[in-house]
Amino acid sequence: MADPAVLKQIKIQTGVVKRLVKEHASYIKEVEKETQKIEKMKAEAQNEDDEYAIKKAGQVLQ
C-alpha cells in the first residue's frame, strides 16, 4: 500500500484542483453576466452619464 502521508498529500492536492476548477467556472459565468449587462446598458444608453457608466463597467470587466 501507499504511504499514508502521500495519500494525504494527494487528497489535499486533489481538493485544491477541484476548488480551482470551480472558481474558474464561476469567473467565466461572471464575465458572461457582466458582458450581457454592458450590452444591455449600451442598448438603453440615452445620455452622457449612461456612456460613462458603460465605460466604467467595461473597465471593471477588464
Image (spheres, grey):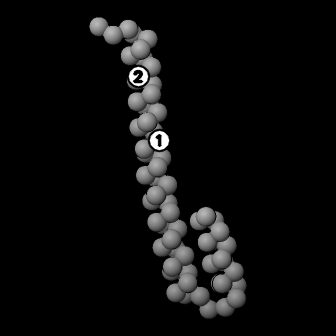
Q: Secondary structure at mark 2?
A: helix
Q: Secondary structure at mark 1?
A: helix
Judged left or right of residue 47, residue 11 is left
Whole-percent x, y for residue 19 in the image: 45, 39
Whole-percent x, y for residue 46 in the image: 62, 92
Q: Which residue is mark 1?
A: 20
Whole-percent x, y for residue 23 in the image: 48, 47
Judged left or right of residue 13, residue 41 is right
Check the picture and name the quadrant holding the C terminus. bottom right
Write the residue at 39% across / 10% down: 4
Query: What amino acid is labelled 2 in the image?
Result: Ile
Judged left or right of residue 32, residue 49 is right
Check the picture and name the quadrant holding the N terminus. top left
Is residue 58 shown above or below 16? below
Q: Residue furthest bottom?
A: 46
**Do tag 1 and tag 2 residues touch (Cβ < 8 Å)?**
no
Q: Nearer the viewer, residue 37 or 6?
A: 6
Is residue 22 shown above or below 52? above
Which disc, if any, is residue 10? 2
Is residue 33 shown above or below 24? below
